[in-house]
């Protein structure tokens, strides 16, 4: 990574840390963000920038707000087909026997590698256009060795075609198909897929995997060097959150039915609570108790859960708006959860913030205040998106020039 960029005249910058010359996580403008070799070098008031910067590309933020790039720590971007008829039937209260996850599994198994790659690229670029610069991507719609490998290969190939970073997670344990499926997953599927993934996830819930089966899968993943994650307490209270704490998962996700005891266990174990408000919105179901999780000491993250069945959105601004409305989060709490919280869920310290040494991923908003992300839901608020010091998504009124002196 060798990109250099000087962002000038920002109205205010959210750093999520103690930036140079700043006394807190917010630096009031006019502010400059200096990125060298793809990393943030400093965030300072414009008057303190100094001279001798060399011939750097310059982005004029024109008084607008700058935030870290969003970190979407829970998506299912690799799949084929769609399930709009199922969604329409659910809205009308009708059963839809042809729908469900297995329809996506069938379509994904039939898709070629090229088709899957194109799908991931298309969705990842939609994420990027709404300010997301790091995206966790789960497999899990293959559910056999060949198809799961193809899904993870698709993520790997797509990563070379998009500016956002893709973080691959193996989710062969999306369902328990019976007939020795978990044994097959542990002894054949996981060893074959592990070289293509960085994380291992399991869907521990009613109608999916039991706590014991989930434990076996995560422990096997750990043996292959994969970071453990867990879908937990979405459909019922089954003990998944306690398992996530016991295993030391990087994250426990959904947590709609988690209680205060679960929250305390997650907090004590350092497990990030990844909340997915768009899923509750699309399903018209209960929402996780974000305030309880925060009060019990949990670090929370927000993510899209982008998938074809229950949350077909790539927009983190939409997720932030729903989180503020339905969880009762402040805009600053939601924004931290969508950036720094997502980074923590991926066990990363180099993303989700704009502090010296962090990756130069940022968003110049088309507004001078980030409260508009919740105040103006659906508005076009994403201007330039910068990945590693390079402008990946030009937009808005800013200009790209050269810095001198």
Image (cartoon, grey):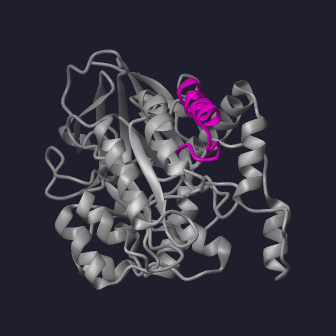
Q: What range of the chain is rendered magenta? A: 132-158
Q: In the displayed structure, does residue 274 sit left or right of residue 26?
A: right
Q: Quadrant of residue 58?
A: top left
Q: State yes or no: residue 200 in magenta.
A: no
Q: In the displayed structure, does residue 165 sit left or right of residue 31?
A: right
Give the number of marks.
0
Q: What residue is rendered at 84% in x and 68% in y?
A: 97
Q: State yes or no: residue 137 in magenta.
A: yes
| Image coords of residue 358 (percent x, y) | 26, 37
Q: Check the image and report above or below for 9 versus 58.
A: below
Looking at this rendering, what residue extends furthest in the front direction?
179
Query: Which quadrant does the C terminus fall into?
Result: top left
Q: What residue is rendered at 16% in x and 51% in y?
A: 18
**Residue 284 visible within the image:** yes
Q: Check the image and report above or below for 190 versus 320.
A: above
| Image coords of residue 26 (percent x, y) | 26, 58
Q: Check the image and report above or below for 377 versus 404.
A: below
| Image coords of residue 302 (percent x, y) | 44, 62
């Amino acid at each position: 990574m060798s990109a250099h960029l000087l962002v000038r005249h920002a109205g205010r910058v959210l750093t999520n840390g103690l930036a140079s010359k700043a006394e807190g996580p917010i630096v009031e403008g006019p502010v400059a963000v200096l990125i060298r070799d793809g990393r943030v070098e400093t965030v300072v008031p414009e008057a303190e920038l100094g001279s001798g910067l060399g011939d750097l590309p310059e982005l004029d933020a024109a008084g607008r707000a700058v935030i870290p790039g969003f970190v979407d720590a829970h998506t299912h971007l690799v799949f084929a087909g769609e399930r709009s008829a199922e969604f329409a039937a659910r809205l009308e209260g009708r059963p839809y026997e042809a729908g469900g996850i297995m329809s996506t599994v069938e379509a994904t198994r039939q898709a070629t590698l090229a088709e899957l790659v194109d799908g991931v690229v298309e969705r990842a670029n939609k994420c990027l256009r709404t300010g997301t610069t790091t995206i966790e991507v789960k497999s899990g719609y293959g559910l056999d060795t060949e198809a799961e490998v193809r899904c993870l290969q698709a993520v790997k190939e797509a990563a070379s075609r998009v500016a956002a970073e893709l973080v691959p997670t193996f989710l062969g344990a999306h369902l328990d198909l019976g007939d020795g499926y978990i044994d097959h997953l542990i002894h054949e599927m996981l060893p074959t897929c592990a070289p293509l993934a960085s994380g291992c996830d399991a869907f521990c819930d009613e109608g999916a995997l039991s706590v014991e089966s989930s434990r076996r899968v995560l422990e096997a993943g750990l043996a292959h060097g994969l970071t453990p994650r867990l879908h937990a307490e979405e459909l019922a209270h089954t003990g998944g959150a306690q398992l996530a704490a016991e295993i030391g998962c990087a994250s426990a996700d959904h947590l709609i039915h988690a209680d205060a005891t679960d929250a305390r266990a997650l907090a004590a174990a350092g497990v990030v609570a990844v909340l997915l408000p768009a899923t509750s919105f699309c399903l018209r179901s209960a929402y996780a108790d974000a305030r309880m999780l925060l009060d019990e000491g949990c670090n929370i993250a927000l993510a899209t859960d982008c998938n074809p069945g229950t949350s077909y959105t790539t927009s983190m601004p939409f997720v932030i708006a729903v989180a503020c409305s339905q969880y009762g989060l402040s805009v600053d709490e939601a924004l931290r959860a969508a950036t720094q919280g997502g980074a923590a869920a991926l066990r990363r310290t180099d993303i989700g913030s704009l502090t010296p040494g962090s990756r130069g991923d940022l968003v110049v908003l088309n507004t001078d205040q980030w409260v508009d992300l919740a105040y103006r839901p659906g508005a076009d608020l994403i201007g330039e998106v910068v990945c590693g010091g390079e402008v990946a998504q030009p937009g808005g009124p800013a200009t790209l020039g050269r810095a001198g002196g």
